[in-house]
Image (cartoon, grey):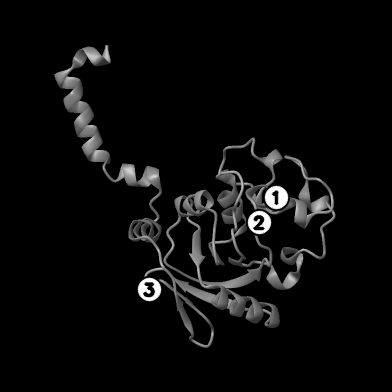
Amino acid sequence: MRAFTTLDGLVAPLDRANVDTDAIIPKQFLKSIQRSGFGPNLFDEWRYLDRGEPGMDNSTRQVNPDFVLNQPRYAGAQILLTRDNFGCGSSREHAPWALDDYGFRALIGTSFADIFFNNCFKNGVLPIRLSAEVVDRLFAACTATEGYRLRVDLAAQQVIESDGTAHAFDVDAFRKECLLNGWDEIGLTLRHEDDIRAFEARRKAEHPYYFR
């Protein structure tokens, strides 16, 4: 998992509440268990005017000009502004995979569905909960200012606007440490690789019949 320390990124506003995981990555794309390759189909039903299927050449599909991510001013955005209850619905881990593969490293909203929120941390995406007043302020600034950017400082737990205004956010200390170091659950286990090897060697010596 990629470490997350600070991010100075372009912001894209998705002004919709209750965005479920089937909207984030539709069910027909869940056959793959690879963590990469989902970005082109993020928000597939909103980005394109036809139904997407695995293996399609997305470069030949007709895009929806009214969808926010298809607007040139938001190309390359790394921070997604959201509304209430983002990531609700089924618990598919493909949703944060698709967001990350598209290029989003941080999400800012008022609330996130619990399982989706947990899955984001496990996949290197930082979900940030701020007050409705602050989120409204950021939406207004983003839509009014082309090239609008924010700085996210995980160590300081702050979202910083270009004028220096800082908005503090809460994050669990353990999740914060994992993100700062790029440790997913496998990475955490492998930190004890020497101890695991020593235990297995001792177990084999003490109980060789287990290994016949």
For residue 120, which numbered disc appears in the image? none
Residue 186, percent from left and from top = 38, 42
Q: Which mark is residue 156?
A: 3
Dot 3 falls on a residue whose secondary structure is: loop
Residue drawn at point x = 57 percent, y = 37 percent: 33
Asked if residue 158 is positioned above or below residue 179 in the image, the reply reads below
Classify mark 2: residues with Cα within 10 Å, few (<14), some (14-19) or many (20+): many
Q: Position of residue 183 (x, y in %)?
A: 38, 52
> Which residue is at 20% across, 15% downward?
208
Q: Toward the viewer: 110 or 62?
A: 110
Tell me the residue at 77%/43% (across/down).
56
In front of the other: 101 or 79: 79
In primary-sequence order, the first of circles 2 and 3 is 2
Q: Give coordinates of residue 85: x percent, y percent.
A: 59, 58
* Separation of marks 2 and 1 at Cα, in angstroms: 15 Å
Q: Label 1: few (<14), some or many (≥20) within 10 Å?
A: many
State which quarter of the image contains the C terminus: top left
Q: Which residue is mark 2?
A: 19
Quadrant location of residue 147?
bottom right
